[in-house]
Image (cartoon, rainbow, N blue to C red):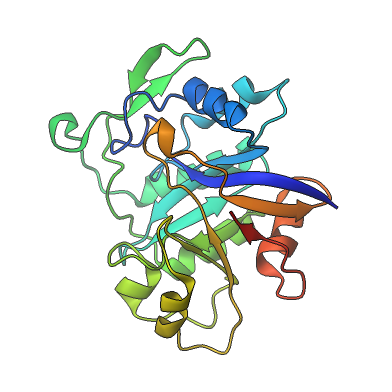
Amino acid sequence: MKSFIADLHIHTTLSPCAHILMTPKNIIDRALKIGLDVIAITDHNSAENLEVAMELAKGTPLKVIPGMEVETVEEVHLLCLFDELEQVLAWQEVVYGALPDLKNNDELFGPQILTDLNDNFVSVVERLLLTATSLTVDQVCKGVNKLGGIVIPAHVDKSNYSILSNLGFIPENLEIKCLEISKKGKINRLFDKINTKKNYQIISNSDAHYLEEIKRSLVLELNEVNIREMRLDLMDNKRIKVKII
């Protein structure tokens, strides 16, 4: 087993709420500078900046996990993590098909910027990403698992966009054993809200929208960095190795 320092919730310039300096190149440079081994790029309802990010990380010690932060019809944010770019792009097709046919308002929400390997702004995604899809929490969990990924409810201790605040509980039938709390979250307060027999693994990430927010969030104990190993580490209650830094 090896220890990997990770941050599994980072937004790029594709997320309209992210700072304009959150380009894939700047994120990779920042992650390497602070000694991260693993990051997950998780833009809102899209994965269009991932190919550039993964290409930039090649030849470096940094592993980029392709991901996405999906907003369900219940306005719940779920982190969806995969092994391969092809998997997340297949999932993107499902998500795009479930988004309303609305155009983004750059002045109101911010631009949704795509960059190239040289850090140049090359285009924008015009469809509105910062909104709820028509997918339910259950549909997201089943769809991601079918593609070989894992789902982690995001910032469950927050008063909005969380599975606890919006549903009031965690459905027992979901293939979920790991919950993310916000960077300032309190684990004890969280468990007061959960009425369940399940023993959920608790993690915390930066949910970075600014470069300086990217941080050494977790220590993962894995044989190698892949979803199968992470599923054991994050979701198997008999193998809880995650540490919140």
Q: Position of residue 141 (x, y in %)?
A: 53, 64
Up-down relation of residue 34 to residue 225 (above or below):
above
Viewer-nearest residue: 224 or 81: 224
Pick the quarter of the image with the C terminus: bottom right
Residue 74 shown left or right of residue 193 in the figure: left
Dividing the picture into quarters, in which one does residue 29 lie? top right
Viewer-nearest residue: 137 or 236: 236
Up-down relation of residue 236 to residue 70 (above or below):
below
Q: Position of residue 204 (x, y in %)?
A: 51, 57
Q: How many marks?
A: 0
Identified at 73% across, 20% down, the residue is 59
Q: Position of residue 65 (x, y in %)?
A: 62, 41
Identified at 21% across, 41% down, the residue is 102
Viewer-nearest residue: 91 or 234: 234
Viewer-nearest residue: 192 or 196: 192
Identified at 72% across, 45% down, the residue is 4
In the image, farthest residue toward the left:
107
Up-down relation of residue 244 to residue 224 (above or below):
below
Identified at 54% across, 75% down, the residue is 174
